[in-house]
Image (cartoon, rainbow, N blue to C red):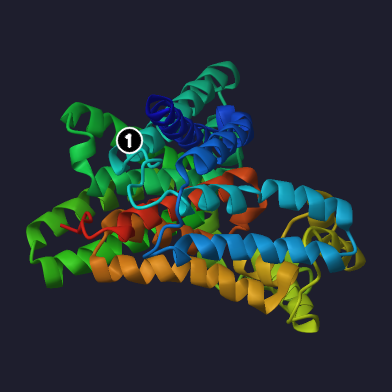
Amino acid sequence: MLQKTNLLETVFRGFFLLSVLFTTMPLLKGLVPPIFIFMTLIFVYLAFSKKLMLSKGKSLILISSLVLYALYSIGTIYTPYLDSALIDLRIKSALFFIPLLFLFDGKNKSLWPGNKNVSRFFVAGISIYLIYCIIRSFYFYLKTKDFSVFFYEEFTPFEQHAYVALITDIAIAILFFYKEFFKNTYVRVVLYAVLLSSLFFLSSRGGILALFLLLGIYFVYQVFIGKKRALAFKSIGIILFFTIIFSWSSPVVRSGLMRLYQNPKVFSEGKKEDSGEPRLLIWEISWSLYKEKPVLGYGTGSVSEILTKVYAKNDYEEYATKRWNAHNQYLQTVLSIGAIGGIVLLFSLLLPFFISIRKRESLVFSALFLFMINLFTESMLERQTGVCLFVIVLAIAFHNLEGNKSKQIE
């Protein structure tokens, strides 16, 4: 019985690593849901045979995700769009199942595959996908002689560019803070080259901004606290150099910067659809809708439906056709399940974030910081990739912050 239990624990860890790999490699993201189902079945068997106990300590990190999913479930009661709500619940199901599995893992954390394995599979998944995207873009460039195939949505055919940019940011942070997981210098150089170049091919302003803010925090820390000024200036200098080169080579980023320079307000009079920054209009509409139902929101699965009606009513045809969501997860959440849902979402992010600052845990701090910044410009939890990435980050936070040992910023 003991050997069978140990074997199942090994299989569980293997499945979780595969879920990390396939989440960060969108080519195979369709395999993630069945992997989660297998993990749940193994957990149920282990729960009865081994009598898994509730983990203590930082369990609120995982419980907050369960509460968030519960609020979305309650939101199906009063939503006028039940079909959309059920689809939304299915997409967000990882918010419930994955935290629950690790929450009852007991003191030994026998189901956790370890930071080293999780980090390597995370970086491997996104690196393989980006190498595929680079090769694919080069192939189409040879056929069309159109340089735009290297940028924006043209570059990433299997997932929206902002999601891929966030995963890329986190992978860069893992390489930066966990050099011991990738000891071969040549491998690290190749990975940095693939990740950094792809980040600017993706042309996600949110992704680039988030990474820069993180590097800025690291720079300030090293200069004023770590006292490693030479290292800080050298690291930031190299990254800034490549950033300027790649940013100006991206037609999407370059045109956005030029538009901002020529029209700093970008939120012009009249038809804001042509203002150069659609998000500002969407946020204004979303906030106006939220103020009408601040407590409970409009119900699970209703946000895109309601926003689409408003777009159509105000003749924003492109927005209505594309059924754009709030492009801000904080607004998306309060519109869907009200202020309480927004508070729970913030709590699930800020609790491990502040603990990571106190413990100086670099991986958790970086991943959560990057995630929170990207939530301002994208509704990340409205797609399977975003939800899975969120629970992976929470699982990393839970297991890293639970014990006394942590990887501190150096």
Q: Position of residue 387 (x, y in %)?
A: 58, 50
Please tell me whether residue 162 is drawn above or below residue 229 in the rendered image: above
The image shows residue 59 at horizontal and vertical percentages of: 44, 63
Can you give x and y, in whole percent of width and height, for residue 309 in the image?
89, 63
Question: Residue 99: x and y, percent?
Answer: 52, 52
- Residue 34, compared with residue 202, is above or below; it is above
Q: Tell which of 280 and 293 is nearer to you.
A: 293
Q: Residues within 10 Å of mark 1 (few under 14, many from 20)?
A: some
Q: Choose top left, top right, bottom left or bottom right for residue 71.
A: bottom right
Kindly identify which residue carries mark 1: 117
Residue 74, visible in the rendered structure: yes
For residue 276, say whether it is visible: no
Q: Secondary structure at mark 1?
A: helix
Q: Is residue 374 above or below residue 124?
A: below
Question: Residue 55 or 34: which is nearer the viewer?
Answer: 55
- Residue at the (61%, 69%) spot, across then down: 330
Q: In the figure, residue 360 lies in which quadrant?
A: bottom left
* Residue located 42% across and 60% down the image: 368
The residue sitting at 20% across, 56% down in the picture is: 405
Query: On the rendered image, what quadrant is the C terminus found in?
Result: bottom left
Q: Quadrant of the N terminus?
A: top left
Horizontal side of 363 relative to 210 (left or right) equals left
Q: Is residue 63 left or right of residue 211?
A: right
Could you tell whether 353 is left or right of 160 in the image? left
* Amino acid, disc 1: Asn
